[in-house]
Amino acid sequence: MSLNANALINFPYIQSITNTQPSAQVQMEALINVVSTEIENVCHRKLAQQDITEYITYSDNRFLKPNIMGVSINQAMPYNGYYKAISLNGYPISGTPIVYMDANQVWGAGTQVTNFLINNDMGIIYFDPTVIIPTQPNAIKIVYTAGYDPVPEDLKMACLEAVQWYVKRLNSNSAGNKDSNKDGVSVSYELGLPIHVLKIINNYKNPT
C-alpha cells in the first residue's frame, strides 16, 4: 500500500504517537487515504500540499462577482473593463499558477495568461482588466500547487483520530453503523467522521 498525494499523515507519524505495530502499516495507510479524502470532501478543498489542475468555465461559481464600479453582482461574466477574480479550489497557493485561456483547449504557449495578481493565502487570482475571459465551457486551465506543507498539527491529529476510530469500528465489525435503543425501539444508522474531528476540520472548510 502507498499513500495518496492528499494524505494528511503517514505511518511513522502514527507510530510516533501510538504503539501501532509495523505489521499494521498496510491497513493504516489504506485508512489514512480514506480519511484524508473524506476530510477533503467535507472541507470542499485540498489540504495537504499537492499539484492541482482545474478547468473552469466563465460562468462557474468559482468566479467572484464584485458589486463595484456600477457592476451588478448578478451580472454575467466576463466583466470586461474591470478586475475579474477566480477563487481556486486549493489554497494556500505555493508559487505562481500557470494559467491558460483557450476556447479550443489547446493550451499552447500562445494561450498562456500572465497579467494577474494572486492572493496566495486565499487562493484567489485577480486578472488584469484587459484580460478577456473566453465564454466556452472549460476554456480556462489553471495548473498550480496548493495546500499545507507542513500540514497543521490539528489537522494531523484529526486525521489520526479518525483513523483510530475506523480501526476500532472495523475490529468490532460495526464500521459505519451505530445502534441505539429508546423506549424499546432499536435503531441502526450510519456514522460519518467523529464529532470531535468534524469540529477541528470545520475551521478549514471552504466558505464558497
Image (spheres, rainbow, N blue to C red):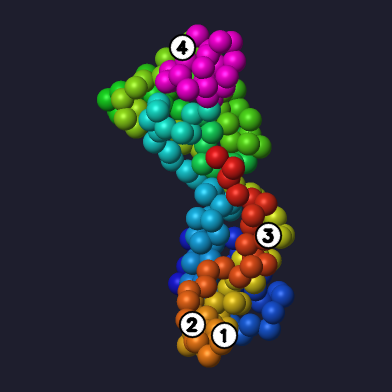
Q: Secondary structure at mark 4?
A: loop
Q: Is residue 127 left or right of residue 56?
A: right
Give the label, 3 or 2, closer to the camera: 2
Can you identify the residue that label 3 sits on?
Answer: 200
Question: On the image, numbered disc 4 is attached to which residue?
Answer: 80
- Give the number of the disc on residue 187: 2
> Identity of the amino acid at label 3?
Ile
Q: Earlier in the sequence, mark 3 or mark 2?
A: 2
Label at residue 182: 1
Q: Are marks 2 and 1 in contact (CB under 8 Å)?
A: yes
- Which secondary structure, mark 1? strand
Q: Nearer the viewer, residue 7 or 136?
A: 136
Q: Dot 1 surroundings within 10 Å: few (below 14), some, or many (20 or more)?
A: few
**Is 127 displayed left or right of 102 in the figure?**
right
| Three-letter code, disc 4 | Asn
Q: Earlier in the sequence, mark 1 or mark 3?
A: 1
Considering only vertical position in the picture, is 128 above or below 64? above
Give x and y (percent) for residue 117. Answer: 59, 22
State the CA–CA distance, disc 3 to disc 2.
Answer: 28 Å
Pointer 4: residues within 10 angstroms few (<14), some, or many (20+)?
Answer: few
Q: CA distance from mark 1 to mark 3?
A: 30 Å
- Asked whether disc 1 touches disc 3, contact meaning CB atoms under 8 Å apart, the reply is no
Q: Is residue 80 magenta?
A: yes
* Above-or-below relation of 153 to 51: below
Question: Can residue 23 be seen in this snapshot?
Answer: no
Q: Residue at x 53, y 69 (%)?
A: 192
| Magenta portion: prevailing SS class | loop
Tag in front: 2 or 1: 1
Task: Give whichever of discs 2 and 1 has the lower sequence position.
Answer: 1
